[in-house]
């Protein structure tokens, strides 16, 4: 009896998880939106096929790699990062796919970076958009104001002393997240 009562609540979740992804062209158009205009046309884009698997949608030699929104997720999230960060990002995707959860993903990657079996560049930018899926017009390739931009600059092992950047977030100012670690990065948030 309990399961019968839960079915109406579970059904929308199951439908969302099985949602067909937008076309490759639509995924590409949305995936590159966080990037400055000069990087969009040459960005490699990874997106989702009908089976829900992450696959290359456009392969280039450009400086940036973008990840399309996951249609199985109920929020809109796209991210683009410097090609030099791909070993670090790819390893994170591999670990999560293998069942590694939460902070353990970084524990493994940090250990591998220190052992020099995983390459981490000296710096690299990441740009992302995040917000409610209802604020996205897939067909038009447009997003509403509820979708927020976040950009970061990875600087492994950076500290407040080495950069002059504080670790506490302050509206309209850069701040340093994960200082002293392989994934230390400067947070650049237009509005907080």
Image: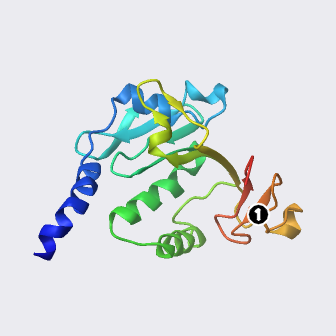
Q: Position of residue 51 (x, y in %)?
A: 22, 44
Residue 95 in the image: x percent, y percent?
A: 40, 65
Indicate the position of residue 175 as horizontal and vertical percent values: 79, 60
Q: How is the image coloured?
A: rainbow
Residue 44 in picture, x, y percent from top left? 48, 34
**Disc 1: CA contacts within 10 A as few (<14), some (14-19) or many (>=20):** many
Residue 60 visible within the image: no
> Which element type, helix, strand or loop, lies under badge 1?
strand
In the depicted structure, whether residue 66 falls above or below residue 173: above
Front-lying residue, 123 or 41: 41
Q: In the rendered view, does 12 fall on the left or right side of 150?
A: left
Q: What residue is rendered at 45% in x and 60% in y?
A: 91
List the residue tagged with mark 1. 176
Task: Please report the residue visible at 73 percent of the width from the left and 67 percent of the height from the top.
Answer: 157
Above or below, comparing residue 108 to residue 67 in the picture: below
Quarter containing the C terminus = bottom right
Above or below for 11 versus 30:
below
| Side of 98 relative to 139 (left or right) | left
């Amino acid at each position: 009896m309990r399961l019968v009562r839960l079915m109406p609540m579970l059904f929308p979740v199951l439908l969302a998880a099985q949602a067909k992804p937008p076309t490759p062209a639509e995924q590409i158009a949305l995936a590159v939106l966080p990037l400055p205009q000069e990087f969009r046309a040459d960005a490699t884009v990874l997106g989702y096929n009908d089976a829900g698997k992450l696959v290359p949608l456009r392969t280039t030699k450009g400086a940036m790699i973008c990840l399309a929104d996951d249609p199985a997720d109920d929020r809109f999230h796209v991210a683009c990062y410097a090609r030099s960060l791909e070993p670090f990002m790819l390893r994170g995707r591999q670990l999560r796919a293998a069942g590694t959860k939460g902070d353990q993903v970084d524990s493994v990657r940090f250990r591998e970076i220190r052992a020099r079996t995983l390459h981490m560049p000296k710096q690299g930018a990441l740009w992302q958009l995040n917000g409610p899926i209802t604020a996205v017009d897939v067909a038009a390739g447009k997003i509403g104001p509820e979708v927020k931009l976040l950009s970061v600059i990875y600087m492994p092992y950076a500290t407040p002393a080495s950069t002059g950047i504080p670790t506490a977030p302050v509206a309209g100012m850069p701040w340093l997240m994960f200082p002293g670690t392989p994934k230390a990065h400067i947070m650049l948030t237009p509005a907080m």
